[in-house]
Image (tube, rainbow, N blue to C red):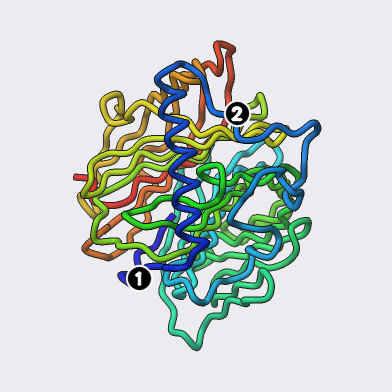
Amino acid sequence: MRTVNRLHGRRATAIALAGVALAGSVGMAAADDAASGHAHPVSQEASRPGPGTDPGFPTFVHLPADQAAHPNSQQEWWYTVGHIRAGGHKYGYEVQLSRKGITQISITDEETGAYTSEQKAFKPDQFSASAGELDVRMPNASLSGPLDAMHLKAGLPQGKGVLDLKLKAVGPALYNNGTGLFPFLDDTSYYYSLPDLQTTGTLTLDGSTRQVTGTSWLDRQWGDWNWDTLHKWTWMAVRLDNGQVLNLWDLFDDNGEKHWATVLGPDGTHRVVSVDPLAPRATRFETSPTTGQRYAGKWTVTIPALHTELVVTAEPVLQEIQANQPFTPGINEADSSVRGTYQGRPVTGDAYVEQFGLWN
């Protein structure tokens, strides 16, 4: 997810301070619930809401307005991952656009394990990001349009892959940390996800264009924080076949390890829950021959408050984007599958797993 730009700063507005207090109270409830064996519900909707529906509880982000750029924030990205199918053939993809003019694009062939990726930086006069609507344009990628008809285009060099997709948001938004105000690296950020995007369009590989359908996930995060405190993180975007969605973090910084998830139900219910640390049960490690980074390829995700255990498997393990930065020479963005139990019942699903920072 995420491209590093070493710019620091803090917001000092009353709303941000109030948000920190509210986000902290949600997090504390989650910790108490994890200890007691109960999850913390933030909201319950009677029927499945759409992405622009008032969630019925206070949030610090607002749709569709916050799809647009936030020029006063030092960090911001639009990060999309998806699982698409052409006939019987399955692919995963990732496209990130940073307001600093950096793109990341990757395509994974789930059948053969073939993987292609690129990170590229552009000069300020080569890209734009509208503050009035969703309209972000780079020379090799763009994302624009309303919630029910977003248009995503991205191309890898030398004809190695071109995506031309329509994304339609059909389910509720996920407000990370239950409010959309998200504690992050000794500061806060604004953060929501659109995890249920009906996806149609085309994928062109080796000169051959094929029609695709599937489901995508858009992550939106912006704010001001201090990258210098970060060591590394594992992040997961998990969609289960029972309709539950998890945005999961296991983050190491100067203050230690933090591990939690925001869980979204199909009816709009949000729960913020503790997750057991991922590292002790991570397996299938492989070392990148390019960067020397050592990444896991299989994780057991245990959520005591939800009586849930999921096994997340990356195929292949190495799906690395070369970042060419001392802080994070590579970022592993792994198309993954999920099996396990949720509240004691069998589930399957798909995921994207990001390993960011120094993994060696």
User: Could you say which disc has been placed on residue 64 in the image?
Assistant: none
How far, Cα to Cα, is label 2 from label 1?
A: 37 Å
Q: Which residue lies at the image location 51% right of the left edge and 52% below the top edge?
A: 181
Who comes first in sequence, dot 2 or dot 1? 1
Is residue 209 toward the left or the right of residue 317 in the image?
right
Depth order, front residue of 80/213: 80
Disc 2, disc 1: CB below 8 Å?
no
Q: Of all residues shown, which one is farthest toward the top?
A: 344
Q: Amino acid at mark 1?
A: Gly
Residue 269 figure quarter: top right
* Picture coordinates of residue 264, whole percent (x, y): 61, 35
Total marks shown come to 2
Disc 2: CA contacts within 10 A as few (<14), some (14-19) or many (>=20): some
* Picture coordinates of residue 172, whole percent (x, y): 70, 43
Disc 1: CA contacts within 10 A as few (<14), some (14-19) or many (>=20): few
* Picture coordinates of residue 339, whole percent (x, y): 51, 21
Relative height, residue 175 to residue 134 (above, below): above
Depth order, front residue of 16/74: 16
**Residue matched to label 2:** 240
Relative height, residue 219 to residue 143 (above, below): above
**Residue matched to label 1:** 9
Under circle 1, the secondary element is: loop
Relative height, residue 325 to residue 180 (above, below): below
Q: Of all residues shown, which one is farthest toward the right?
A: 47
Relative height, residue 322 to residue 214 (above, below): below
Residue 60 figure quarter: bottom right
